Amino acid sequence: MGLLERLSLGWRTDLIFARFEGVIEERGDCIVVRTPANPLYYWGNFLLLPVPPRDDGLAHWLQRFDEEVGCHTRESGHVALGFDASRPHEPLISWQRAGFEIFESVALKLEPGQLRPGARDLPMGFHFAPLDLQDPAQLEAALNLQCTANEADAMGYERMGYREHRFRQLQRYAAMEAAGLGHWLGVWRGHELVADCGLFRDGRDGQLGRFQHVTTHPAWRRRGLCTAMVEAACRFGFEQQGLQMLVMCADPAEVAISIYESLGFVRECRYFGMQRRPSRDALPVT
């Protein structure tokens, strides 16, 4: 069995998007993932390791990243590596001292019979509807929403570089829509987009769907819009897209994971990423 076949559900569904327009190559020691159309995308240009790296492996993996990915992404200047770990792994102190953020994600899954209704319906004046990313105005609405949320959340990414990255991402999602692989979905208040997310199928397993980039406008948070949107998106996926399993990935420390679990999502596995940002994208000092 190759490295790709042994990946967790989280990484396996992450690769749906790289596989559509990128390059995925299995090496003897890792999987190389590149997205030539968007070198600014950290997690479209990374190495995926079959086991957690050792703390003393920093220099080796920096060299391997540069050989396989970094030489193609000078425009970005990031370093990113992912790995699966089903049990506690060796602390990566040297990596943290070298400027790496190390974070855990949880993959949650949902099947049709598990979906539970949210606590509240959408308020009067709001409605759920797919976007048409082929329409420049609707793509721009999604882009503006995502960039506004990024600034409000103080994620540290340089403004214009982040906007260009999200624009290229939305162009990819538009191409996936045109190929029949999914939809971008949103909650609208009249003509204003106030929340959005993507839901796309695996091109090799048409019944497996993966959510992307769930966002709510900062001015409309804590009003139940995210819960109502995700519930509506799940129903759309099951009823309109014919999906039989939906995957949502989240930070286990963030409040969003409780929203997904309230709708019936169950935790399937955990997986890890490490990224070192270029100086322009450094986190703000607090």
Image: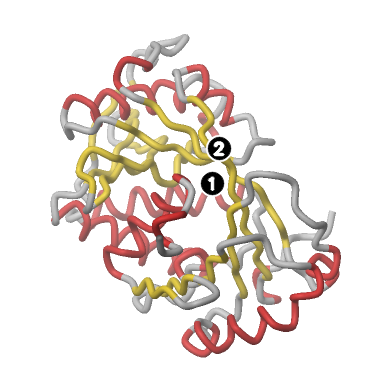
Residue 281 in the image: state x and y as whole percent: 65, 69
The residues tagged by marks 1 and 2 sit, at their Cα atoms, a distance apart of: 6 Å
Residue 149, numbered circle: 1
Residue 218, numbered circle: 2
Residue 252 in the image: state x and y as whole percent: 64, 36
- Image colouring: secondary structure
Residue with the most extreme front position: 1
- Residue drawn at (24%, 42%) of the image: 131
- The answer to the question of whether label 1 and label 2 lie on touching residues, with beta carbons closer than 8 A, is yes
99 or 68: nearer the viewer: 68
Is residue 175 left or right of 54 when viewed as pictured? Answer: left
- Residue drawn at (61%, 64%) of the image: 157
From the viewer's perspective, is residue 167 above or below residue 241? below
Q: Quadrant of residue 245?
A: top left
Sequence-first disc among 1 and 2: 1
**Secondary structure beneath label 1:** helix
75 or 234: nearer the viewer: 234
Residue 6 in the image: state x and y as whole percent: 45, 54
Q: Which amino acid, by three-letter code, is at mark 2?
A: Pro
- Residue drawn at (40%, 46%) of the image: 212
